[in-house]
Amino acid sequence: MGEAKLYRRAFLATSTAAFVGTGPSSSRALAGTDEGNFVSLGKIAARRGMQFGFALNSRRLVNDPRYAAVVAQQATIVVPENALKWAAVHPSPDRFAFTQADTIASFARANGIAMRGHTFCWHRSLPSWVTQTVTRRNAEAVLVDHISRVAGHYKGAIQSWDVANEVINLSDGLPGGWRNSFWYEVLGPSYIEIACRAAREADPAAVLCYNDYGLEGDGVNGANKRAAVFSMLRALRNRGAPIGALGIQSHLRAGRAESFGPGLARFIRDVKGLGLDIYITELDIDDSGLDPATSDGIVAGVYKRYLDLVLETGAVSVVLTWGVWDTPHYTAATPGQNGPMAQRPLLFGPGGSVKDASWAAEHSFARAPLLPPR
Ligand code: XIL
């Protein structure tokens, strides 16, 4: 039997059982029987011309050999979850703290895995020295210096940089839907272009990426945000700014009425039409509203539907999940922070065990359109 058939058979066998609520709903039975047939997601994605991987925590990479082994086996691309955010990497004006991200970079290099960088301009994770000492007068110099130093340190080692993260927030009421953030206040909307040019100069090989959330839903909020992001990207391209990709974070929730659909697929094609690649950068699926007895199958179904939708466009070349394996936590899509946490939001169970969602992703990657070599 061909490999594709095997994935299909395995995925359908488990997901159907879970969807109708009969048979074993958890991955454990599956892990015991079929895990040996599971092929690395990174390898399957590579056959279709795509990269697959995870956001990483450097301490776990060092302290947990199982974690490192699963990453090495499944990923062809990784990103530090927090280690390259401003407060982590540049905690005081004269101090750069590269150790944690260096750990991830060395691991990636040693294992032939690509690495993304996340992130330069963000309204969060700004250390107080920035908000207290940066003014309109020195803002451009400080931003350019930060990017030159950090992108320069990883020059040649980064596949793509999230140059700007979450800069659109329609509820702030600013023209163009811009978020009323620190960088907007001191530099106005030109800060993205300033940041792109600094990143391009520091690392000419890295693809420069705009990353955001809330672009996925088919409802009016998603549609409005997509329109604002599209206009911003088009304006950047028209001015010749070196922006090369859009990151769609994809923090999803299972079990609610409003969901993703044709609006997202159309948007991806439109952004591709501007000449940008599209990456799925932070995928996870909050299951906190589901009955644990059936949640694995439902989450797998959402992964399948989402990956099929975005991969079918032929414009998505990179997919990463926001974490390696399930641990109970609040995902970025979990409502509030006092209610129930997501329990099993990722593609692998604890220790990297194969679960319904793993098969779903494998099936989606295996049947994705073949991307041209880049
Ligand atoms: C989150 C991390 O996962 C947390 O550990 C941290 O405390 C806060 O940031 N969008 C992003 C990511 O772009 O950087 C965020 O990561 C999740 C939402």
Image (tube, rainbow, N blue to C red):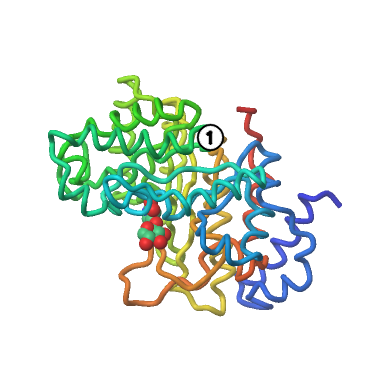
* In the depicted structure, whether residue 76 falls above or below residue 32: above
Question: Residue 348: horizontal and vertical position, in percent?
Answer: 61, 64
Element at label 1: loop
> Residue pushed farthest front?
94
- 301 or 336: which is nearer to us? 336
In this image, 341 relative to 2: left or right?
A: left
Question: Residue 359: horizontal and vertical position, in percent?
Answer: 67, 59
Q: Is mark 1 within 8 Å of ligand 1?
A: no
Task: Tell me the quarter of the picture where residue 88 sits.
Answer: bottom left
* In the depicted structure, whether residue 363 falls above or below residue 195: below
In this image, 128 relative to 4: left or right?
A: left
Question: Residue 243: horizontal and vertical position, in percent?
Answer: 39, 29
- Say if residue 15 shows up in the picture: no
* In the depicted structure, whether residue 20 falls above or below residue 135: below
Task: Tell me the quarter of the picture where residue 144 sits.
Answer: top left
For disc 1, the neighbor class at 10 Å (few under 14, some 14 to 19, many from 20) is many
- 215 or 165: which is nearer to us? 165
- 220 or 92: which is nearer to us? 92
- Say if residue 284 shows up in the picture: yes
Residue type at mark 1? Ala
In this image, 158 relative to 179: left or right?
A: right
What's the residue at 38%, 45% (across, down)? 119
Q: Which residue is mark 1?
A: 315
Specify the quadrant that holds the C terminus: top right
